[in-house]
Amino acid sequence: MKIPLARPDVTEAEIEAVLGVLRTPQLSLGPKLEEFEKKLAEYTGVNHAVATNSGTSALHLIVRSMEIGEADEVITASFCCLLLSCVL
């Protein structure tokens, strides 16, 4: 039995947005990133938002920002990113 973890839903709008960035000299850290972070902060009602390159990087930042240490207990789901164990 195959259980798909994710099935992409990519429309022509997403393809055009990616092509628009690919046609610029800034593939990372460009104006679209700043625009995304601002819109995400507005949407979630916070002052700041930070985009990362992966879920693993995001989890790493969360753990570090919470100052979780060796003596702390962290409980995760039974099915989660393997690298989360490495981050903790």
Image (cartoon, rainbow, N blue to C red):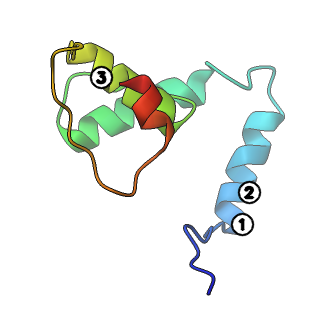
Residue occupying the point 35% across, 25% down: 88
Residue at the disc numbered 1:
12
Rate crowding at label 2 as few (under 14), some (14 to 19) or many (20 or more) other CA atoms within 10 Å.
Answer: few
Q: For the residues marked 3 and 2, what is the alpha-carbon distance in whole angstroms?
A: 33 Å
Label 3 or label 2, whichever comes before in sequence order: 2
Q: Earlier in the sequence, mark 3 or mark 1?
A: 1
Mark 2 in CB contact with mark 1 (< 8 angstroms): yes
In the image, residue 1 above or below residue 38? below
**Label 1 crowd bin: few (<14), some (14–19), many (20+), radius 10 Å:** few
Residue 58 lies, in percent from the top left, at 42, 30
Nearer to us in this view, 66 or 79 = 79
**Mark 2, secondary structure of its residue:** helix
Q: Give the residue drawn at x 21%, y 12%.
A: 67
Q: Left or right of 60: which side holds 7?
A: right
- Distance between mark 3 and mark 1 Cα atoms: 36 Å
Tell me the residue that label 3 is attached to.
63
Q: Is residue 49 above or below residue 84?
A: above
In the rendered image, residue 18, in percent from the top left (x then y), is placed at 72, 46
Q: Is residue 41 left or right of residue 37?
A: left
Residue 48 is situated, as x and y percent measured from the top left of the image, at 28, 22
Asked whether disc 3 touches disc 2, contact meaning CB atoms under 8 Å apart, the reply is no
Q: Is residue 77 above or below residue 69?
A: below
Q: Secondary structure at mark 3?
A: helix
